[in-house]
Image (tube, rainbow, N blue to C red):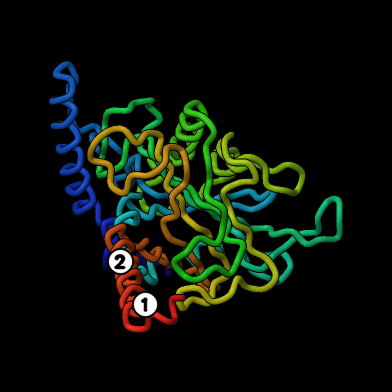
Amino acid sequence: MNSFPAKFHSVAVQPGILAAARNRSISRFCSTAVLAALSVVCFNTAKVGAQNLTYAPGDLLLYFMQFGGTQTVMVNLGPAWTYRDATANIMNLVNIGSTLMSAFPSSTGGAWYSDTFPGFLSSEEKPLTYWGLAGVRSSTDSNTFVFDGDPTRTVYVSRNRINSAPDGTAGSTAWFVPSNTSMTIASANILSQNNRMEVASTTPILVEPASSSLVDNSNTFLGDNLGTAYSTFPGGVVGGFGTGDYGMIGGVSAEGAVDRYRILATTSPSGIVENGTRREGQYQGTFVIDQAGVVSYIAPIPEPKAWILALVSGLATFTLARRRHAHPEKSR
């Protein structure tokens, strides 16, 4: 049975709490907007008449698909910014094992995490099932509004973790989006994909035929290789499962691991949390999944603060100076 633990992200399945949190955020956003431009009329449109009370633009969606498959799965993990601010691992975030087994039955006696197919141009076995993350609040080209610490066109996407980097550090290359136009294209495509959660579901989990889902349309293949995701990210943002497991990470025997990146379309407005380089991905933790379908989040190791680095450097210089003063002959 699928379960969402009643901790940290329990709002993902408690509509009343989730709606209240969103309304508070929207009120803060509208107040800022009115100060910036009195002609802007702010009102809470996020959940008025909405079908799915557990979803709003800006949520981080986890999704699964298969090469040539007939169904896709999407899981709402709650507002993307909450993981940005996480300082500790979040274990057993959600269990979707039964959903994946039902959506992706094996015809070979395997499972969603181990099924493969022979490559078209070689004898190499290719993963059959893939998974990834995506979230964005808006595709509007604005350098003014900041919502919950993010400019509204802030993109969150995954990248397959391909090396055994230490826990809490990136095991993949950070994304870089080459232009403002590409940011808009990526944002619009992610919004279109994720909006299926709004119009086709009333719960945090959506199992949908590939014919109506936009997951496979947004995460394309070139032959049997991953293509360009959201018309922006070459090589795709998803990771594949297959023979053997990924290994241990964060204490989890993982079948798959994807790093999460935050990409800012602008760095100019005030109020941005963890500002960075425009259109360059910031590593913000790793999501892992085990054979049972339990998803966990491994938080990034905090980067040393500038004052700490300065203090360490100063202490090293002071220590070296004292040693030279005490033993002047060793410094010659």
The kind of residue tagged 1 is Arg
Q: Which residue is mark 1?
A: 324
Q: Hey, which residue is sitting farthest right in the picture?
A: 122
Residue 246 position by quadrant: bottom right
Q: Where's residue 182, x and y in %?
A: 52, 30
In the foreground, 244 or 322 = 322
The residue located at (57%, 48%) in the rendering is 237
Residue 223 visible within the image: yes
Of 11 and 160, the residue lying toward us: 160
Q: Quadrant of the N terminus?
A: bottom left
Tell me: residue 132, above or below residue 191: below
Question: Compared to 324, does 226 lie above or below?
Answer: above
The residue lying toward the viewer, choosing from 196 and 173, is 173
Which secondary structure lies at badge 2?
helix
> Does 102 sit above or below residue 142?
below
Query: Does residue 141 lie above or below 13 as drawn?
Result: above
Instruction: Answer left or right for 84 relative to 222.
Output: left
